[in-house]
Image (tube, rainbow, N blue to C red):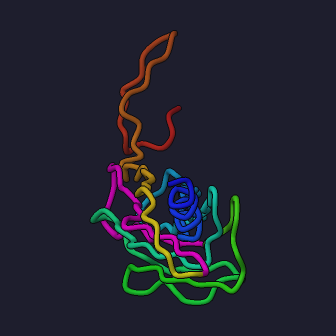
Amino acid sequence: MKMVFKLIIFIICLIPIKTFALTGNVEISCNPVNAKENDVITCSIIANAIDGEVTGFSADIVLSSGLEVDSFTPDSSWQGDGSANKIGLYTAENKTDKFNIGVLKIRVKQNIADSSETISLNNIIYSDSEFNKVNISNVSKNIRIASLNNYLKSLSINVGSINFNPNTLSYN
C-alpha cells in the first residue's frame, strides 16, 4: 500500500503544472488636457507588466465624436502599427515593469467647443513569448474642449460706472 501511495505521489509530481500570472495596467497621459478645435493632443501610452513579461500588445482606440486619430507612433522597440483605430505591436524584447507603448496624436474636430471628450483604449491584450494572452482593463482619459466664446460677460468697477459692450475693445 505504501508503495502504491509513493507511486501516485511520484506520478503527480511528473505532471507539469502551468501557472500564468501575468497582469498589468495601461496609462494614458495627454498634453494638453484642455484644447480647442483643430488642436492636436499628444498622448503617451505607458504599460506596466506585473509578474510576467510582455512581447505583444494590442488595443482598440475608441474616441468620442469630437475627436479623430491624427497618428500613432510606436516606441522604437516595437514592430507593428496603429491603423484603423487598432494598435497591434510585437517585440523580440521581454518587457517588464513600466515600458512605453508609443505616442498617440489626436486631433479635435472642427466646430467642437465647450465639451468634454474621451480618449479610450479598449480590449487591451498583453501576450508573452509563448503567445499566452491576458486581458487588461480598459483605460480612458477625459479632454476638456474650451468654449469659442471669449467675450467678457460683464465688468464691474468700484468708482463710477461704465456702459459695457462686449464688442468694444477700449474705453476712455
- Is residue 118 visible to us here? yes
Asked if one can make out residue 18 in the rendered structure from this viewpoint, the answer is: no
Q: Is residue 48 left or right of residue 113?
A: right
Depth check, front residue: 162 or 30: 30
- Queried whether the magenta region covers residue 122, the answer comes back as yes
Quick check: 65 left or right of 17? left
**157 vs 91, nearest the viewer:** 91
Q: Residue at x 34, y 70 (%)?
A: 110
Q: Whole-percent x and y of residue 46?
A: 61, 62
Q: Nearer the viewer, residue 142 or 135?
A: 135
Q: Residue 133, position in %: x, y?
A: 46, 73
- Does the magenta stretch mainly form a helix, a strand or a loop? strand
Q: Which residues are the magenta region?
A: 102-129
Residue located 64% across and 57% down the image: 51
**Magenta stretch: includes residue 38:** no
| Residue 33 percent location from the top left of the image | 52, 52
Left or right: 93 with respect to 50?
right
The answer to whether residue 19 is left or right of residue 48 is left
Q: Position of residue 128 (x, y in %)?
A: 58, 75
**Residue 47 vertical placement versus 133 (above, below):** above
Q: Residue at x 58, y 70 (%)?
A: 14
- Look at the picture and state if 5 lies above or below 131: above
